[in-house]
Amino acid sequence: MARGSAKKTASGNTFLLTLLRNGFLATNAIYLLVRFWLLRSSVSKPAMFGYVASEAIALGLWLTLQSMAAQGNDLQQSGLTQYMFDIIYVTWFVQLASLVSGKFWYLYLTIPGYAAYVIYQKILLPYLFRGRSRFASLQGMLKGNRDAQQPAGENVSKRQQKLHARAAKGDARVQMRKR
């Protein structure tokens, strides 16, 4: 059974690596032909710097994915592997779209923007802020919400509401823990 799974992983990896190779060949051929043959007058240092820098990043990720596949890792897994594929796809799109307008290079900023969002959601919020979003409490105060100290998205059950009411009255049976 383990050999069958390894064969499926290897064939899936081969397919993905072939797809990446063909994608690299197609996007680079289109970009270089259009930029240097059809749009010769639009060749500039910033455009070439953007192309070379983004291509170096994408090639580095492609080589990393190739070495992962050679080690037997599954390239179809989620997580960092999927982010590598996404960066390569964004690179291809930005390179081809930049043939239409140089402003498309700004779309490449979505990658660090998304990375900052993921770091906030998966590292800062749960570990440093203890699950309480600073923005949610601020938003609650602006709306005039009395429960602004409560984390966003936390539903309080009827039982918990009753316990809070008893604790507010000073009932000795209820012991509330402080967060």
Image: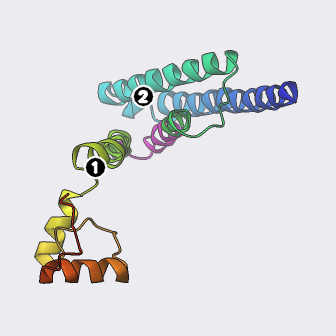
Question: Hey, which residue is sitting farthest front in the picture?
Answer: 172
Q: Residue at x 23, y 75 (%)?
A: 173
Q: Position of residue 39 (x, y in %)?
A: 46, 35
Is 77 on the left-hand or right-hand side of 1? left
Residue annotated with mark 1: 125
Is 1 on the left-hand or right-hand side of 31? right
Q: Residue at x 23, y 58 (%)?
A: 133
Most prominent secondary structure in the magenta stretch? helix
Q: Residue at x 24, y 57 (%)?
A: 132
Q: Position of residue 134 (x, y in %)?
A: 18, 58
Identify whether 145 is placed above or below 120. below
Q: Give the SS element for disc 2.
A: helix
Q: Foreground residue, 8 or 15?
A: 8
Residue 57 part of the magenta-drawn span:
no
- Dot 2 or dot 1, earlier in sequence: 2
Identify whether 154 is placed above or below 45. below
Q: In this picture, which residue range is highlighted in magenta? A: 89-102
Q: Give the SS element for disc 1.
A: helix
Residue 97 part of the magenta-drawn span:
yes
Classify mark 1: residues with Cα within 10 Å, few (<14), some (14-19) or many (20+): some
Q: Position of residue 83 (x, y in %)?
A: 50, 37
Quadrant position of the C terminus in the picture = bottom left
Inspect the image, locate mark 1, and give the three-letter code of the amino acid beneath it: Leu
Quadrant position of the N terminus in the picture = top right
Q: Position of residue 63 (x, y in %)?
A: 57, 18
Task: Say which quarter of the image contains residue 161.
Answer: bottom left
Inspect the image, locate mark 2, and give the three-letter code of the amino acid beneath it: Ser
Residue annotated with mark 2: 54
